[in-house]
Amino acid sequence: MSENFKIYFIKEEFFSITDWAQYKIPIKEKRPVLILVIEKEEFPDGLFCIPITKDDDKNRKIKALSMKRPDFIHPIKINRYDSYLLIQNMYILHKEFLGEQYTLNGVPFEIKNTKIQREIMKKVKKVDALLKRGIINYVPREKVFEIQLKYLEEKKRKNP
């Protein structure tokens, strides 16, 4: 089953691994973290995750930033709220830490509109290109994934 373009929670265990803020991964105290999942073939055990934020958290700063840097942030509507995909903060999450799928009125939420999917992927590719060229440096994706793999190996070794 494909998780592509579906919205999920992250398991609490993920946040206990390390202080993710030092890797520029947004962490919300007292509120679940929602992510949009994108599958990529080069990481079969991982999922590319785009953090989601609501603008009311930031006094409209995200909306202003999305206009200034439209390739880094993508607006989406979730349950009548203005929410934004923080594409520049995308990271790789091991499938082990993928939580429950986000639902609205009992229906799993996903982005089905192919036009919106293409718009998001165009921005993802642009941010990827900027990262590869060293023009921007946000989340060290491979490092974040390596930390998760080491944690899972250690956990498996302790609890065979």
Image: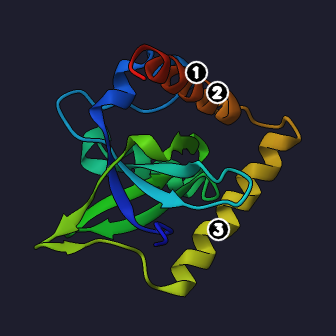
Tell me the element at label 2: helix
Distance of label 1 from label 3 (alpha carbons)? 29 Å
**Residue at 67% of width from left, 50% of height from top?**
43
Q: Position of residue 32 (x, y in %)?
A: 24, 41
Which residue lies under the disc numbered 2?
146
Give percent across and percent down for residue 62.
42, 47
> Horizontally, is 110 left or right of 12 in the view?
right
Residue at horizontal 26%, vertical 72%?
108
Q: Look at the picture and state if 76 lies above or below 85.
A: below
Query: Viewed as shown, does residue 152 lie left or right of 134?
Result: left
Q: Nearer the viewer, residue 93 or 125?
A: 93
Q: CA distance from mark 2 to mark 3?
A: 24 Å
Query: From the viewer's perspective, is 39 left or right of 60?
Result: right
Q: Nearer the viewer, mark 2 or mark 3?
A: 2
The numbered mark at residue 125 is none
- Look at mark 3 in the image and give the residue it sits on: 121
Query: Given contact means CB atoms under 8 Å apart, are the residues at marks 2 and 3 in contact?
Result: no
Residue indicated by mark 1: 150
